[in-house]
């Protein structure tokens, strides 16, 4: 424990990078997934085809491979990018692909009569989607979305391999300095658990609110 306390400043720097990275990826990945899920259902056939290729390819590719492709592949194409933004891009595409499929499935599960009722009230597509379909799909979206968000937090540990100073990278630096692996990695594991428990509790609260709003 003394080792952790003595090196808490370095671990906190890594924690800040992890939290910022995860927050950016979750927000951007959720926005991309929402648009992707809607496009998979309602887009023109070229849009649906492109989105299906994107979702299937990204979901079938290991996350570490995506990070390496962004970090090493983009500079090879003449696109300058540092490790943080390469990791953000890879994780964002990963989250967006998974959330696209979540949103598609949840919206598809809403009975078609609900959309017909909105159309009968004179609602055009986007208001119908916003006020009728998405509120009913919300409770089905939230549990798998929480799972994806926790996977993103755990996935941030891979960015240490492209020299991003996240929590795990900082833990490795402390290990090199002190030679005490067990307390450092236990502390890092505990921090990851706390982050994911926070997301899970927030998701559970949102799910209860969404279910109550739908019932009302």
Image (cartoon, helix red, strand yellow):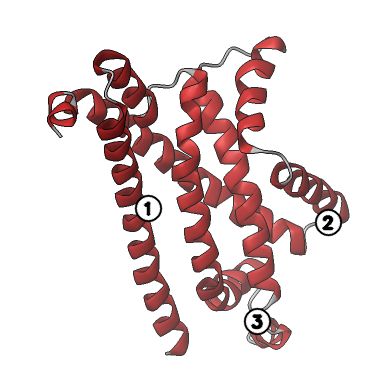
* Neighbourhood count class around disc 2 (C-alpha, 10 Å): few under 14, some 14–19, many 20 upward: few
Alpha carbons under labels 2 and 1: distance apart: 37 Å
* Neighbourhood count class around disc 1 (C-alpha, 10 Å): few under 14, some 14–19, many 20 upward: many
Q: Residue furthest right?
A: 45
Q: Which residue is mark 1?
A: 196
Front residue of this view, candidates 194 and 215 = 194
Q: Answer left or right for 33 relative to 9.
A: right
SS class, disc 3: loop
SS class, disc 2: loop
Q: Is residue 209 above or below residue 93?
A: below
Mark 2 or mark 1: whose residue is earlier in sequence? 2
Q: Which residue is mark 2?
A: 44
* Neighbourhood count class around disc 3 (C-alpha, 10 Å): few under 14, some 14–19, many 20 upward: few
Front residue of this view, candidates 74 and 50 = 74
Q: Is residue 142 above or below residue 95?
A: below
Q: Which residue is mark 3?
A: 122
Are the two marked residues, 3 and 2, in contact with CB atoms closer than 8 angstroms? no
Residue occupying the point 59% across, 33% down:
90
x and y percentages locating residue 82 in the rendered image: 51, 16
Residue occupying the point 31% across, 56% down:
198
Residue occupying the point 59% across, 12% down:
80
Q: Answer left or right for 206 relative to 83.
A: left
Q: Quadrant of the C terminus?
A: bottom left
Q: Is residue 66 above or below residue 201?
A: above
């Amino acid at each position: 424990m003394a080792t952790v306390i003595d090196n808490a400043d370095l671990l906190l720097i890594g924690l800040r990078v992890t939290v910022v990275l995860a927050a950016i990826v979750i927000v951007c990945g959720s926005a991309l997934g929402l648009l992707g899920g809607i496009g998979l259902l309602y887009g023109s056939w070229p849009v649906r085809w492109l989105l299906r290729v994107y979702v299937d390819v990204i979901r079938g590719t290991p996350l570490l491979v995506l990070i390496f492709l962004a970090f090493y592949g983009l500079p090879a194409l003449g696109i300058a990018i540092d490790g943080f933004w390469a990791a953000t891009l890879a994780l964002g595409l990963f989250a967006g692909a998974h959330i696209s499929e979540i949103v598609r499935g949840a919206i598809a599960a809403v009975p078609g009569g609900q959309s017909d009722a909105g159309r009968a009230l004179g609602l055009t597509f986007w208001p119908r989607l916003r006020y009728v379909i998405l509120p009913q799909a919300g409770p089905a979206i939230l549990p798998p979305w929480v799972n994806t968000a926790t996977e993103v937090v755990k996935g941030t540990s891979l960015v240490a391999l492209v020299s991003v100073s996240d929590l795990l990278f900082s833990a490795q630096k402390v290990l090199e300095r002190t030679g005490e692996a067990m307390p450092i990695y236990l502390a890092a594991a505990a921090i990851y658990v706390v982050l994911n428990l926070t997301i899970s509790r927030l998701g559970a609260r949102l799910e209860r609110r969404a279910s109550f709003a739908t019932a009302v």
